Amino acid sequence: MDTAQRRILVNRFDKHLLANLPRADFQGRIIVIDTIGDANKAVRYLQRQPLLGFDTETRPTFRPGPMNQVALLQVSTPDTCFLFRLCRIGLPNCLVRLMGNRHIRKVALSWVDDTNQLKRLRDFKMGEFIELQTYVRQFGIEDASLQKLYANVLGQKISKAQQLSNWEADVLKEPQKQYAATDAWACIRLYSELEQLKENGNWELKNNDESVS
């Protein structure tokens, strides 16, 4: 195989390169869910999908003390992302069943932390997830952040501008919805791209010891 055509991955992505990358944004449908009835309908749709990306958002605290509870659970397909406002509906049975579904591949990043936060809402048994921080190690990638991983594998930048916004606001603003949907969808894009590279072997790893963590 011509090595010039191979995808080049690095073990650690230099964060200083992020500013020059094009921005990645989810281009599909974004649907906000703030009633139990709508949550049940959304989950019925999601249970028919073969691959889902997950993420959560929590209103930040800017002083010492307990963290706020999870405000938002994002669940994305390649073209549709549902934003479940847990600050309004809690963690309903339909979402617990979805997260425990063994027949759907579920992908997330730093999901142990998210699981611990979700279990503050109610105790439940979490199903198996593909943890991207673990999955990327088979490629020799050492980074753990979604932003660096996405830049490394797909050559685009995920904006974090809305990360510290108020996720319990009465109405989520469009930039918040876009940010939340992009994070969940990006997990699918990363996993799918890496699976393809693994299947065709069209990649190589370069050690970037000058990278800044």
Image: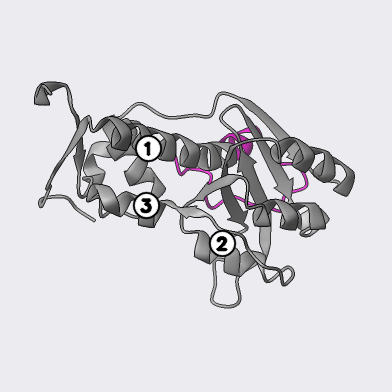
Q: Name the colouring of the figure.
A: one colour
Q: According to the image, label 2 marks what residue?
A: 114
In the rendered image, residue 175, in percent from the top left (x then y), is placed at 59, 35
Is 204 drawn above or below residue 126 in the view shown?
above
Residue 203 lies in what quarter of the image?
top left
Is 83 drawn above or below residue 178 in the view shown?
below
Do the numbered discs 2 and 3 sit on residues whose CB atoms are within 8 Å?
Answer: no
In the rendered image, residue 81, in percent from the top left (x then y), is placed at 64, 35
Is 56 drawn above or below residue 195 in the view shown?
below
- State left or right for residue 16 relative to residue 117: left
Prevailing SS of the magenta stretch: loop
The quadrant the C terminus occupies is bottom left
Q: CA separation, marks 2 and 3?
A: 17 Å
Q: Please tell me the numbered disc located at residue 146.
A: none
- Residue type pointed to by label 3: Tyr
Q: Earlier in the sequence, mark 1 or mark 2?
A: 2
The quadrant the N terminus occupies is top left
- State left or right for residue 201 relative to residue 118: left
In the rendered image, residue 12, in percent from the top left (x then y), is placed at 21, 50
Do the numbered discs 1 and 3 sit on residues whose CB atoms are within 8 Å?
Answer: no
- State left or right for residue 140 relative to residue 167: left
- Residue type pointed to by label 2: Asp
Please tell me whether residue 55 belongs to the stretch shown in magenta.
no
Q: According to the image, label 3 marks what residue?
A: 135
Secondary structure at badge 3 equals helix
Number of other residues with Cα within 10 Å of mark 3, as a class: few under 14, some 14 to 19, many 20 or more: some
- Residue type pointed to by label 1: Glu
Q: Residue at x 78, y 39 (%)?
A: 44
Q: Please tell me the numbered disc located at residue 195.
A: 1
Of 52 and 63, the residue lying toward us = 52
Q: Earlier in the sequence, mark 2 or mark 3?
A: 2
Q: Nearer the viewer, mark 1 or mark 2?
A: 1
